[in-house]
Amino acid sequence: MLNTALHKPICPKCESSLKKITLSNQAFCPHCYTCFLEYFSQSMKIGEAISYNPKQISDAIKNEKYELANSLSKDLKIPKQEHPYLFTRIEFLRNLDSYKFLNSENDKLKPAILSELNSRNPEVREIKDLSNNTVLTSEGTYIKVLNEHHINFGYIGTSNNTQELEDARLKNQHRDIQNNFTYHEKLGFLGPDPSHLGEAFKLQFGIALPHLYMDNQIQRISQACSDLGFTLKPMQIKKNSPLIYTLENKSSSNTTLKETITAAIQLGYAVKKAETHAQLKALESDHSYKLFASSYWSLGSLPSLTSEEYFSYIEDMICACLFNYLDKHKLQELTQLFQSQLHSILLLNDEQSDCDTSKVMNKDFEYFLNTLRS
């Protein structure tokens, strides 16, 4: 007789067993967390840093208790401070309370979820085809739907301080108050991934590490970052010689957004110091110069570029300029060009699709060349 004991207890809403949840390391509906609260709270150490409760803030505002609302929000505020990164990116991961989480078993729910998201978020109405599930809502902001979570609110910033992150947090707080996203008082915002509950965010910080790459130190640096709760990976996953990397938080479930940003800034300065040491070491050879020179001169022999090649060359040239392998007077123009393409680079990398073989428009290619050689 089949032994069913290992598959009990079972979530009454989605009929997922605790064994299924532990083996897959994911929850299948919001009620899974209520049903197996002890497992998620103790075994996975989730819920130790929940300080953000949008319902409390919403209730305070509805009851015109504005001082209480401000007090509840005060500790969440990200203090303005400088950071060492080329760009910052944050996504808030949200799910509707009335639907199961996304997985291969319930693709048929996507049209209904999209319909409800449309009714609550006017920007989502631009998404007509589920194969193209990202919409840019304004400069530096975007929305992704039905991509691991029901909806992701994303913000990309290029300033050298945390003000843009605070602006994004505050804007998303208003969204959380206005929407009925699934939330648990002990666990925070709920989703399929137990490692991204709490304030439910993903942070990404961009940093140029060409000399650490050329000195074969990326693996060592990556391990050090991992030990501190961050993942270091190439900004462009498919690039043969990655020079710009992103630092990403592994979890939001047992920490706060403010704490994670502070830790990322401290780590960023330490990594940047290691990059400086590697740059000084590189002065003993001409390997770095040869890499940038090869990339620079090969551009002139190309009749055209695919989008993927274009992004790759932009990365090479912005690094060459940042580290004085190109004339400094080109830095401002190259920085503006890099920032103008940042949305496309990061969102294309998210998809991890086949190589983009579409050609860059001649005028854009010519502008790139003229910027480098004027």
Image (cartoon, rainbow, N blue to C red):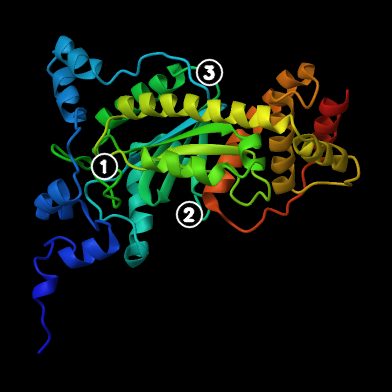
Q: N-terminal of the two: label 2 or label 1?
A: 2
Image quadrant in which you'd find residue 64: top left
Q: N-terminal of the two: label 3 or label 2?
A: 2
Q: N-terminal of the two: label 3 or label 1?
A: 3
Which amino acid, mark 1? Answer: Leu
Q: Nearer the viewer, residue 250 or 275?
A: 275
371 relative to 69 in the view: left or right: right
Residue 273: give x, y in percent of width and height: 54, 25
- Local packing at callout 1 (Cα closer than 10 Å; few below 14, some 14-19, many 20+) is many
| Residue under pointer 3 | 160
Q: Residue at x 34, y 19 (%)?
A: 78
Disc ID at residue 56: none
From this view, report whether residue 269 is shown above or below residue 112. above
Q: Nearer the viewer, residue 330 or 174?
A: 330
234 relative to 252 in the view: left or right: right
Identify the secondary structure beneath mark 3. Answer: loop
270 relative to 104 in the view: left or right: right
Residue 313: give x, y in percent of width and height: 74, 40
| Residue under pointer 1 | 197
Which amino acid, mark 3? Answer: Asn
From this view, report whether residue 105 is shown above or below residue 223. below
Q: Residue at x 35, y 48 (%)?
A: 150
Q: CA distance from mark 2 to mark 1?
A: 25 Å
- Local packing at callout 2 (Cα closer than 10 Å; few below 14, some 14-19, many 20+) is few
Q: Residue at x 26, y 65 (%)?
A: 23
| Residue under pointer 2 | 130
Q: Nearer the viewer, mark 2 or mark 1?
A: 1
From this view, report whether residue 188 is shown above or below residue 157. below
